[in-house]
Amino acid sequence: MMENLWSKTNILHKVKMGKKVEKSFSKDRHLSSAAHHDDENSNKTPEPDLELEKPHKCTGSFEKDFTELCKQNAMSAIPNVLLRQKSLTGQSGSVDLKSSKREDKKQPVAQVHDASEADTEINEDGEPIELPPKTYTTKPIFEYLKPSVQVEMDNPDKFDTVTEVYVRGWKIDATMMEIFRQCWLTLDRLHTINLWNTGLTESTLHTLATFLPQCLNLVNVVLDGNTVKEENWSELLGLESLIQHLSLRHCKITDKGAEKIGKALGHAKWCNTKLITLNLSGNLIGDVGAQALAEGLRMNRTLLSLTLMSNNIGDKGSEKLAETLSRFPLTHEEIVERRKLLSDRSSPERKSFDIFSLSQSYSSISGEDIKEKDAKEGTKTVKKDKEGDGRGSKSKATIADATKSVTAKKDKKPGKGRPVPTDSEDADLMNSDGSDQLSALLENGEFMDGQYWIAGNRVLVNLNLARNNIGEEGLAAILKAIQYQTTLALANENKPGANGLLRLQLHKNNFSFDCEAYRKLTDLMASKDPMAKYSISPDISK
């Protein structure tokens, strides 16, 4: 009996154990199948996250757009966008109350310490010592070394009103330049960018020059302290450029870069009509570069200020600049372009007259050909043109007195000169179409020795040639140019835009301040300088 019971209990125990083992096996099978299912899912490509891969669309809020684009490009360190601190006193010394109020609203109100606090200093009498007002804020040293983008805004609380952007002392690579491109194109009020010592290269500078014309209100560009070996700065002054004020100080620009900039300022077929001021101080420009810049100023009638301080310009470069400021003969290419402008703008009668006179004088046609043409046009017209009403002779006499090298018109041979359009005729030609109003090729001039001479650039009002290598020869050439401009200004005092240079800086050059030429030049410019405290009447006869 006992054996049967024992066997039965063993059988029941085995059955129960079998059920537990089966349950455990079933659990293991379930886990293994789940793991196998997970492995299969892991082999499948995950579905793309549309929100992460969707590119950020700029909204015009500079801080938000800049941060999101930096995150999208997986930048480890994102520069902060900070409000640029302005000084309370401006150039005139007055306090800018509006800017100070804006800063007060932006900054938290400082807590006033009570006199009973422990950190208040007390004098011998037991009275608290008043600390001097704190006009600055201190930060850890590494806060100033971290890259940041400083901005100025019309409204300090709205980053969609950014007007100026300043980046100073950290490198802008191709990725960052692309981020700036996307951000700046949406800023409607942006008018100034300042990228000081940002390590620009040929590619980043090309990218910058490509999209700057799309910023419609951007007129001020400062790129000081950037050294580009290829010197492709002229790309900033292309056909579509809107830059009015360009500063390229201390960029190690050589004659190679200056030649490119000179061509971008103007030539016979085209000239820049947007740039007003150009600062090239502290570069490596020599006589060749100065001559190239002078060539660009021959046709340019928009640039008002040119700064070439602290370069390597000598007598040859200064003489070429003086020639551009006084008067010069047109080249063959410029004569051809002048004929095209006259033929496109003038009436048929005047067109045939001007083209014929130009071709005869420039090509030195013989007197027999002139007589044949005169016979066709009529002797009365020729006599009338020679006698005139005094306007053309007065203008020519003025130029002759200024240069003291032109002979009287009566002594000229028939083959060396023909009548040219008077001042009123040139004014009609220049005002007939607003697109070519500033073309120097349409200015009035005269023929001498088979060349057509026109007055030089009298639109430039400020020229800074301080700290160069100019000697007494270059100084004498500049003096003659200023005397010529002064004579023309006195003869055409009722006409705007004929004053010429108003400010000229020549200190720290290779000539003595005691020389007669410098003394005359100083007295002459003192009467023209609008910033001078006193005026001295010019003495041109000296």
Image (cartoon, grey):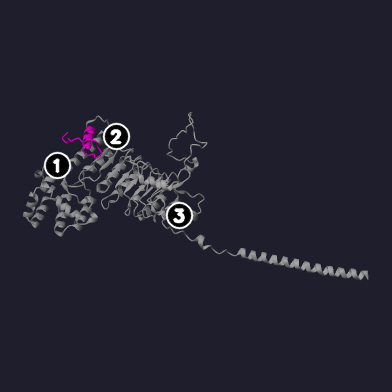
Q: Nearer the viewer, residue 405 or 431?
A: 431
Inspect the image, locate mark 3, and give the three-letter code of the amino acid beneath it.
Lys
Residue 476 position in % (x across, y down): 23, 35
Q: Which residue is mark 1?
A: 400
In the displayed structure, does residue 343 sit left or right of residue 308? left
First to last magenta residue range: 517-542
Quadrant in the rendering for residue 326: top left
Name the image quarter holding residue 188.
Answer: bottom left
- Count of numbered marks: 3
Helix, strand or loop under label 1: helix
Precedes in sequence: disc 1 or disc 3: 3
Asked if the residue at tag 3 contacts the one at tag 1, i.e. Cβ–Cβ closer than 8 Å, the answer is no
Most distant residue in the left direction: 380
Asked whether 525 falls inside the magenta stretch, the response is yes
Q: Does the stretch in magenta take in 403?
A: no
Frontmost of labels 1 and 3 is 3
Gap in angstroms between the C-alphas marked 1 and 3: 66 Å
Sequence-wise, which precedes: disc 2 or disc 3? 3
Q: Quarter of the image containing the C terminus?
A: top left
State the residue at coordinates (78%, 66%).
Answer: 21
* Mark 2 residue element: loop
Q: Which residue is mark 2?
A: 507
| Mark 1: amino acid | Ala
Q: Using the image, determine if residue 372 lies above or below residue 309.
A: below
Label 2 to label 1, Cα distance in Å? 31 Å
Tag 2 near tag 1, CB within 8 Å: no
Frontmost residue, 434 versus 287: 434
* Tag nearer the camera, 2 or 1: 2
- The disc label shown at residue 464, or none: none
The amino acid type of the residue labelled 2 equals His
Taking the image as drawn, is residue 446 in sight? yes
